[in-house]
Amino acid sequence: MECIPLITLHMRYTVPFLCALLFLCRTLIIMQWWRWMSVLSTLVANLGSILIFRWYLHDVKGVYGYCEGASVLDSHALGAWPVEDLLWMIVQPVSTSVLCCIIFDYKPAVLVLKPKSFPSTWRLRFKGFALCMTAAIMASVASWLDEDNELPLLVDVLWWMMPPLAAEWFVVGPYLQDFNAKILLLPVLISTGYWVFEYMIASSYHNSWHVDSALSLVTFVPFWSTAAISVDEIVYIFLNSLTAMLAMVIADVVFTYDRYGMRRRDVVVAVSPSRPPDPLRKALGAYIYYAWNIADIDACVDWQHVNDVKLSYQLIREGSKSFSIAAAMFPQDVREAIYELYGFCRVTDDMVDTCLTQVEKRKVLLLLQEYLDEVYNVPDRERSPFVIDSLHMKAQAKLGKLWDQWVTAYEANEHFECEFGQSHAKFVEDVHVAMRCMERIIRRFGLAKSEVQELIDGYYWDAEERKMETVDQLLVYCQAVASSVGVMCCRVFGISDTRTLRYARDMGIALQLTNIARDIITDAEEGRIYVPAVFFPTEGKRKQLIEDPYHDLAWAKSTAIKLLDMAEEYYYIAENFGIPSLPRDAQVAVLLASKAYWAIGAIIRKCLVYPKRAYVPLVRKLRVLVEVLFVIN
């Protein structure tokens, strides 16, 4: 069988695989310092370990062998070991780390971590550590006694790989029980599967290198192939990928420590006490400090903030599938702020909708107005406790009274259904958390009071059941309830340019018009009509829509198409002028949201009969995502 040089194999398989991974998560690594630092530290730690171990197996044990001509460069890293093999050593841990970046970024540690009791935490640490070290010691003793070099490769794999696994488990073991096992194992299995495939190609098909069969415990031949690989080698690849994955979990927990740690400000000062730290020094200092103190994370994390983010994530996931997928494209810190902003908009809208009378709705709006006034009246918002957490302080006496009145009225009403997956039994708690999240966003991003006020003013249309007479009134309503949110999102992105803010308002109008076009029937069932009166041929037609929403579906479809035609102009302006002016790490998410909502309109246009509620299938959303990734890049 012809011997293929290792460099040829790299160009055919290794380099394309690595380039594809880096393309998928380039934004994650470039925009978030802790990501590339995690990948780099994982590479450095694993590379040193792998280099020594592979040298030991090749030159000392004689496990590996290479065909003549495998090394085109005719040079060797250590002893008789081809230097081209180094690329495998580099790419293998990097590929696992990059896969973890992609997968963990959509399910970050903040969504699963929770406080733990001190005794059980340390018991779990020592159990895992003792188990790994016992396996390592037994394997090392057996290898030391094996003077004739007859034990299988698996023994050497265990004594070499178990100590780093033991160390990583001691650091992060207690937190693994909070993670979804599928999320943890997915990058390990993908990486292991690919590298097993490439090792089989290199050893069996191209005869570039081989493992001594006498030192293999079992040789594995898949049913779909004639290529073989040693089970010992599979275990080695799996443990190596597992080590890289645990290193990334440590990085994820470290980031949670940095993002939600209550001693974060002290760390920044400690890094550079004489002058403000530059980003690199701050990053290095914070990473080292938090990694060193990770065992104490429970005592130093702001668990209230962590739990608020969890609830906000649950609200957006249950309330809007399209927005939750789009929001996943933001960098993690921006995404969490968007979660919190959405949660406030969601629950405050539900506060108005769940009221049974106009009197109750007006009281809700008085509560929201008083809350907003109090938030912006606090002289030092950065250091003061949250307004919603101090309802019964003397300064917030009026707000506390309005809050108690709303809670009493809400609990007195009968609520037979759940609000987007949230039980009514905890809706009051959800509102409390959402208000605290909004105050946190106002403090952090400096939202203007007028921007939040516009949203609350939009609720008056529903509370007072105003009749939508003209298209101009419809556009005013869309600006109040949707454009205001677009402006606040821009503040989260760090944008203050008036032109870009104007484009954000156009995007809000387009999305809200699509919402109204989609929900003509479902809104009518709730007794709400947002279609302007000029779209109805007679007043009787409008009343008929309330009494029998399904009476004239042909009219509903033609009206929806008129609204979608209005939205098209705003979509065009927002996508061609607004989105390109956003920061690059926000463009994918915003364009994805725009395209997903535009797809809702396309489905309505294609349906023969107006659907009760049009939605975009998951497969189409994924196709839109791929298209957006290529458009942005």
Image (tube, rainbow, N blue to C red):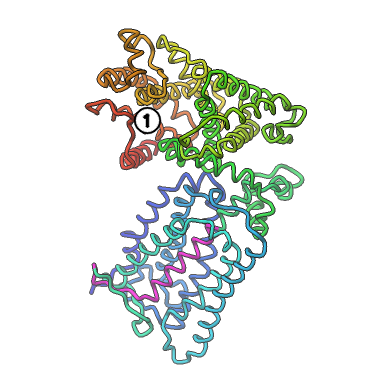
Q: Along the horizontal axis of the image, is 101 left or right of 172?
A: left
Residue 510 vertical position relative to residue 224 in the rendered view, above or below: above
Residue visible at 68% across and 52% down in the picture: 300
Q: The C terminus lies in which quarter of the figure? A: top left
Residue 243: percent from the left, percent from the top? 50, 65
Q: Along the horizontal axis of the image, is 237 left or right of 209?
A: right
The magenta stretch spans residue 444? no
User: What is the residue that sits farthest to the top in this orientation?
Assistant: 538
Residue 241 vertical position relative to residue 35 in the rendered view, above or below: below
Point out the stretch of residues depicted in magenta.
224-249
Q: Along the horizontal axis of the image, is 449 left or right of 17?
A: right
Regarding residue 599, the answer to whether it shows in the image is no
The magenta stretch spans residue 226? yes
Question: 445 or 579, which is in the foreground?
Answer: 445
Residue 559 sits in which quadrant? top left
Q: Along the horizontal axis of the image, is 285 left or right of 497?
A: right
Query: Which residue in the protein does label 1 denote?
Result: 597
Q: Amino acid at mark 1?
A: Tyr
Residue 378: percent from the left, percent from the top? 72, 27
